[in-house]
């Protein structure tokens, strides 16, 4: 990673991670869980694992907007965790597919005008 990319990604770019465990025993609960997942995707979140969605944000202010949107989507029942980390912290995550190291998700580049 060159200095420019490192500078761009340092601490301003944020990732929001939403982890959830929602009940799906009744038709109403399954519908609520599906609606929660679809609304996350509509807001730009991508599936990282079955019950974990991630979203890249260009700034902490933008990440706060998406956090508030998730709070507005919370289903009546279930457990939802929201974690916001910097791009630098996200880049330190090790991802494995089985015993093999898997590449990290692509990070959108942000243009710097000044």
Image (cartoon, rainbow, N blue to C red):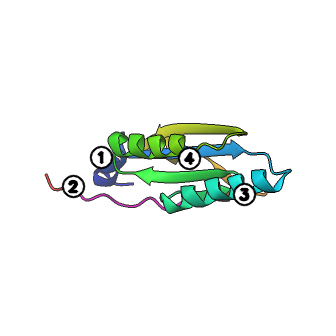
Q: Which residue is mark 1?
A: 7
Depth check, mark 2 against mark 3: the one in front is: 3
Residue positioned 68% across, 40% down in the render: 76
Q: Main secondary structure of the magenta part?
A: loop
The magenta stretch is 102-111
Q: Residues within 10 Å of mark 1 (few under 14, many from 20)?
A: few
On the picture, is 70 further left or further right than 14?
right
For residue 112: magenta? no
Residue at mark 4 to residue at mark 3: CA–CA distance: 13 Å
SS for dot 3: helix
Mark number displayed over residue 31: 3
Residue at mark 4 to residue at mark 1: CA–CA distance: 34 Å
Q: Which residue is mark 2?
A: 112
Front residue (pair 25, 54): 25
Residue 10, picture quadrant? top left
The answer to whether residue 99 shows anywhere in this view is no
Q: Which residue is mark 4?
A: 73
């Amino acid at each position: 990673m060159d200095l420019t990319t490192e500078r761009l990604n340092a601490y301003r770019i944020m990732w929001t991670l939403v982890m959830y465990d929602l009940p799906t025993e009744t038709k109403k609960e399954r519908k609520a869980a599906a609606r929660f997942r679809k609304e996350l995707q509509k807001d730009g979140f991508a599936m990282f694992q079955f019950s974990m969605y991630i979203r890249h944000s260009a700034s902490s202010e933008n990440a706060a907007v998406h956090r508030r949107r998730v709070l507005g989507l919370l289903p009546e029942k279930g457990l939802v965790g929201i974690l916001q980390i910097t791009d630098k912290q996200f880049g330190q995550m090790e991802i494995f597919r089985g015993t093999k190291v898997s590449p990290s998700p692509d990070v959108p580049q942000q243009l710097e005008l000044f």
